[in-house]
Amino acid sequence: MVMAKELPEDLVIKILLLLPFVSLLRFKSVCKHWYALITNQNFIAKHVLHNKNCNTQLLLKTRDKANHDYVVSTISHETLQVSLTPLPPPYFGVNKEFHIVVVGSCNGLVCLHDCLALHDVIWNPATKETKVVSKSNLPRIVPAGYRTRIEGMEFGFDAKTNDYKIINFITISDPRLYFCSPSENGVIFHVEVYSLRADTWRKVDGPLCFLSIHHINPGIYINGMASWVAYGNGWEESFVLSFDMSDELFLKTPFPDTYSDGADKIFMLNELIAIPFIDEQGFKLSYDIWSLLKVGIKDSWTSLFTIGPFIQINDSLGFPFPLGFWKNYTIFIVNGQLVLYDPSTKQITNLQIHHHVDKEPIQLVTYMESLVSLEG
Amino acid sequence: MANNGENPSPDVGGKTVKLKADDGEIFEVEEAVAMELQTVKSFFDDDGVSYDTVVPLLNVSSTALAKVIQYCRRAVELRAKSGDDEGANEKAREEREGLEAELVREESDEGIKELILAANYLNIKDMLSFLCRAVGDRIKNKSVEYVRRFFVLENDFSPEEEERTRNEVAWAFEGVDAD
């Protein structure tokens, strides 16, 4: 009788690395050895790397027009098919007192922030694991009447220590000052970093500057670096502020000379920072897309293309604005609803996503499914 | 042993190499094709080994070796076709993918495992790569029982342990192919 053939372990692992994560989750039940193999963090890290490109999706956070519930959807990067994902346990129920912001996503983990309860939740939508991150209890000096605000947040991965981190950019300011420069006495700056491994918050030295006001566009995380649009003494002094997740050091990249202001959003395009600079001409608005080839090097800004011109949708909705890139330079735009715009063909595709536009802006982040665990 | 009818006669020109399968059957193969098998290449890279030496491939059956040779022969031809021309490259790539699909399409689970083991032993990188992908595609929607049979694995979970493990990700068991 011919014995059924067995494959050696290295071939088994080669095959497992090619499987979609949902198959891997199921095959944990094959036997104890496979359970150990599949849940091994080294294997999971390799699987993430292997599948980075084909697994990319988009995570979309919207608020339903009808019942005001938060809706999180994943959009397939290939087909644009939308699938609903239930929010993680801390946000179950119809409590409309949440104000949820997506801080960021990397390696399959998503970080959510509740602006009311002020805590964060790190969540793996694929394995449904969640962890509530305790509020920072780092000492902060808050003069009487001053207001504490988290200006910017990001979530990312420190490859050197295999750690996931949240960074909060906090200002404590005198609300009576309508506008002040960062060097004035009316503002105190704090940068705090949370480490998942240590499960603690830590203070980090940061630059004295403001981040772009839109707290719903926390920033962008690309390959170990978080970035935001920032400004110093007024909008004239705008730049890209980047934070290296491993070194925990900040880097500034001034805007290109043609534009000293006029941008408040930052996206990723082909693994690089891309910024839509606003070009206002009377009643019309265009966005000039520039890409930063090397963080920190002002000369490496490259002009790509322009989208628009657009006219105002109406007084309350304002102008259409970009939300992020999809493949082949097509771009998601919110013009009262979420659409996909192809600059080369000028074609517009409505994504049919119902949204309560007035209440809260849509958020879109790049996401990929993974088995990364929140435990050590 | 008899020369496999599919092999060209040595008069075609260019050197040939003799490969012996585990049952003693000898395959005479063009040098370029034989060198696709890194194991064979290393065999001759050793000092002083003459090309007339028959290469013993003790771990490969003649059925598997015949298929490997057929694949490598076509792969070498296709590679010769592609060059700077994008159109030609694209066509060659499509043809290679068709070749790969054809190789695995009719293959039983045992057959495909035999091919993977042969490609692994003979160290044929591209072939091993696509065979792993083919196996992955074959099993990804299958049940846990199917996978146990395929990889010859014992279920060493207790009934309680297995139930617990399954319930951890109950939703991952929906939509699985029937065995």
Image (spheres, coloured by chain):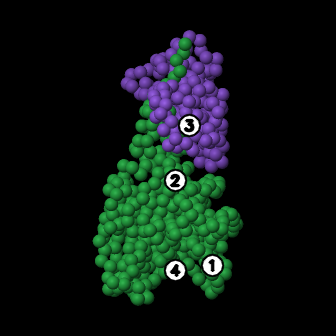
Q: Mark 3 lies on which chain?
A: B
In the drawing, does residue A250 fall left or right of residue B114?
left
Q: Quadrant of residue A330?
A: bottom right
> Which tint was used for chain B?
purple
Q: In the rendered image, which residue does mark 3 sit on?
A: B136
Give the alpha-carbon distance from disc 2 to disc 1, as whole Å. 32 Å
* Image coords of residue B78 (percent x, y): 61, 37
Task: Determine which of the numbered discs, if any, sits on residue A125 in the image.
Answer: 2
Contact between labelled residues 2 and 4, with CB atoms less than 8 Å apart: no
Q: In the rendered image, which residue does mark 1 sit on?
A: A317
The residue drawn where x is 34% and y is 76% is A189
Label 3 and label 1 in one chain: no
Q: Amino acid under label 1?
A: Leu
Q: In the rendered image, which residue does mark 4 sit on?
A: A262
- Callout 1 secondary element: loop
> Which tint was used for chain A?
green
Give the alpha-carbon distance from disc 3 to disc 4, as whole Å. 49 Å
Label 2 and label 1 in one chain: yes
* Image coords of residue B161 (percent x, y): 46, 34
Give the alpha-carbon distance from disc 4 to disc 2, as whole Å. 35 Å
Q: Amino acid under label 4?
A: Gly
In the drawing, does residue B24 fall left or right of residue B97?
left
In-front residue for pair A176/B161: B161
Name the mark nearer the viewer: 2 or 3.
2
Give the alpha-carbon distance from disc 3 to disc 1, as whole Å. 49 Å
Q: How crowded is mark 3: few (under 14 residues within 10 Å), some or many (20 or more)?
A: many
Give the alpha-carbon distance from disc 2 to disc 3, as whole Å. 24 Å
Q: Amino acid under label 3?
A: Gly
Image quarter in which the N terminus of chain A is found: top right
Name the mark nearer the viewer: 3 or 1.
1
